[in-house]
Amino acid sequence: MDKKRIVIIGNGMVGHRFIEDICDKKRNREFEIITFSEEPRLAYNRVKLSSFFSGKTAEDLMLTSGNDYTRQGVKYYLNEKVIEIKRNNKCIVTNKGTEVFYDFLVLATGSYPFVPSIEGNDQTHCHVYRTIEDLEGIRSSGEQSNVGVVIGGGLLGLEAANALQHMGLDTHVVEFSARLMAVQLDDGGSELLKQKVTALGVKIYTGKTTKAIVVGDNCRYKLKFEDGTELETDMVVFSAGIRPQDALAKAHDIEVGEHGGIVINDACKTSDKAIYAIGECALWRGRVYGLVAPGYQMAKVVVAQLCGEDTVFKGADMSTKLKLLGVDVASIGDSQSITPGAQSYTFSDGIEQVYKRIVVSEAGDKLLGAVLVGDVESYQTLLLTMLNELPLPEFPSVLLLSNSTVDTGLFGVVNLQDDAQICSCYDVSKGTIRNLVAQGCTSMAKIKCETKATTGCGGCSSLIKKIVDGELISLGHKVNNNLCEHFQYTRRELVDIIRVKKIKTFSYLLENYGLGLGCDICKPTVGSILASFWNDYVLENEHIGLQDTNDIFLGNMQKDGTYSVVPRVAGGEIMPDKLIALGQVAKQYNLYTKITGGQRIDLFGAQLHQLPEIWKVLVDAGFETGHAYGKSLRTVKSCVGSTWCRYGVDDSVGFAIEVEERYKGLRSPHKIKFAVSGCTRECAEAQSKDIGMIATENGWNLYVCGNGGMRPRHGDLFASDLDRETLIKYIDRVLMFYIRTADHLQRTSVWLESLEGGLDYLKQVVIEDKLGIADELEKELSESLINYQCEWKTTIESPERLKRFRHFINSMESDNNLKYVTVRGQKVPKPVSVKLENINRDKGIDQK
């Protein structure tokens, strides 16, 4: 029997996925497959284009090769454009005169970048951001430039800005609409994203319309805006959206939409029943999908149709999670509250730089959408809750809590139906994963090989592992708890390897005990372990890639992109000269000054380039860093104790200072806070801290694993009537056992709750030395503490290290875009008007 011939016009990600799918079904034996690419290479990963500027090559981005296609029997043409479709004869013609007949034609022509009709938009150093050739042109211009502007503040625009920053350019983003990522984010999420991106040195201009690009005065070009303002630059990158590549269809009387896009039905057929369209060129029910995952689903539908299966396209979810300029961002479903009667719940943390908003139905029983900026840990849980219409808890606002809190109970994987979609990129259901585990696919690698799940955006990895683990447990198998695909060890096993082998760097650990290049799971986890054991200088080159923004700049980033300055004030006790020094710094740099609940004086509003200047003054005045930016000991709060208080039975201030001096700089899986109360009246609130000490007539009572925050937990009484030496010994052991066994970013409270055996087991390990490791725990903690250094003192002594503290790459100028108002005599960031729609106060969350 003669083979039917399928011709695919376009070999981008979606066109290639179609070929993959039909080959995976072994139907390439029944069909002759031919594909045409206008580009000089086969399919590559456009989603990861920006990695081209951080060392990846075109070869690294390739999704296939000529050898792969040849082996699968796929014929391909490169650098050849289809210019004619002879529909009556079922034949296509290329610009090189090639004629190929088809039985079925698949249009996977994708989209093209929209370039606004701006005068001067076609000059030499004006580029679009779409292909590898485009990127090579951008890189070439970047080598001849100091300043770069991206026109467009959407997903691709911020990716392009990231590329310009990687090249060392002074980077600007100009956006026509009033906010960044206007399609995906609401006002609050967009504003926080803008603040975080601005803090990284990218200047953002929203609500700007460019009317011309002319010769510049100081740079190569000058952008002239409709409002009369101007901006000089050496190069321009257009990333103002995409348009469906439908010209070929339109020229040959295949139906297209009024505003573009090749019209398809649920079977992805065009108005010509022998021609299909998939991906960004296709218009389904009036909608063009601009993400790759819907295109993959369309490809799957067409393969099924050609194989005689009755599968149809039912639309696609446009939720997305990504990292833009190092900022975690996610958008789910109806993020804009478009649904009639929708209610929204909002959480905003200016200190931790986190914004979350969930949108629920009018009845409050269904999740409709969400926006996450700064913390996207709950993305997969929220996405599955929405996609599978899971029932919401009585108070939906708990969904704003961390993933570790909401991914239990109603939201556990056990409660998902088998038809629940787990991997949206490759449309893999929970039932598919369960069946594969039952058939012997007992590892993530095998699941990935069989389904390709986790190889798209990767957001489903943790959930799929939970499903696999749950099935293995139910079948009586041992569960694989590897940290990630790069390390075939648990965090606890990595702790032991690092500790026993005395490994000091991530690169050595990866080379000898891991695979690949590492990821966003293992890098910060290993960074935390290394810091906890060896307490090396956090800005050493080997460690810098493992840190988050706060550690990288030794300061907490605030809501407007500036930083707080928090010197250590042990026990809250401070001499007048030091108070004067703080006052002088605050006055000189016009910083907002606040005495905190942790008995420290925080100075807010310092710009990045000011931090070294400020800390030079403070270090000279005798201050040290307070480590407010680190996952480390933050504060040791105290009352005045027996020194002044008539109820005090011990010197809580003196002991708090002693304790803080001992544990200062100790790095751990999460931040830790102490408190010391001089009597049982508990003015220092010691029972709400990770480590709490309360003086009694018979000695010290030790409380462990409490915390405040969104999920407060009362500390547990661990031991009573202790002398100071025993108390310190127990604290040493508890802390090092926590460092050894807790997960990355796991508070002591959550750690204790998840510890098998709970408080009783912890007492057996620490007090009774059940495991025989008590002396070892004390020794390891002492070794870590010996390496303490004031990181700011080390930093300001090194001219090379100070180079990173610049707001702008090529200038020491300040950021003049910051806006402030005066409140109670001090400056604070100018409030941003955020519309909170239908906030339901009775459902457990405040408008704040």
Image (cartoon, rainbow, N blue to C red):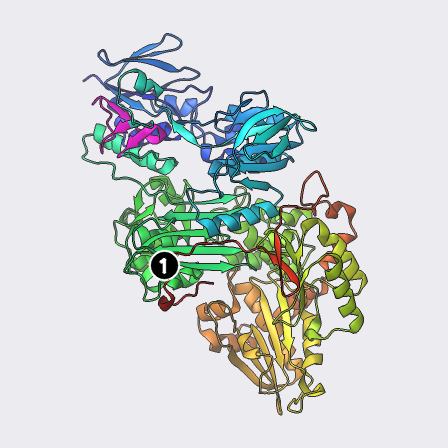
Inspect the image, locate mark 1, and give the three-letter code of the amino acid beneath it: Asn
Depth check: 437 or 816 in front? Answer: 816
Q: Dividing the image into 4 quarters, which one contains the N terminus?
A: top left
Q: Number of labelled discs?
A: 1
Whether residue 627 is visible here, answered yes or no, is no
Q: Position of residue 456 (x, y in %)?
A: 41, 40
Depth check: 159 or 13 in front? Answer: 159
Secondary structure of residue under mark 1: loop
Q: Position of residue 841 (x, y in %)?
A: 38, 66
What residue span does the magenta drawing correspond to? 263-285
> Where 73 sits versus 289, above or below?
above
Q: Which residue is farthest front?
A: 228
> Where 683 sits versus 835, above or below?
below
Task: Report the side of 396 relative to 664 (left or right).
Answer: left
> Where 659 sits versus 404, above or below?
below
Depth check: 687 or 497 in front? Answer: 687
Task: Report the side of 563 relative to 443 (left or right).
Answer: right
Report the residue marked by disc 1: 838
Q: Position of residue 788 (x, y in %)?
A: 71, 62
Depth check: 191 or 372 in front? Answer: 191
Q: Position of residue 46 (x, y in %)?
A: 46, 32
In the rendered image, which quarter is residue 296 located in?
A: top left
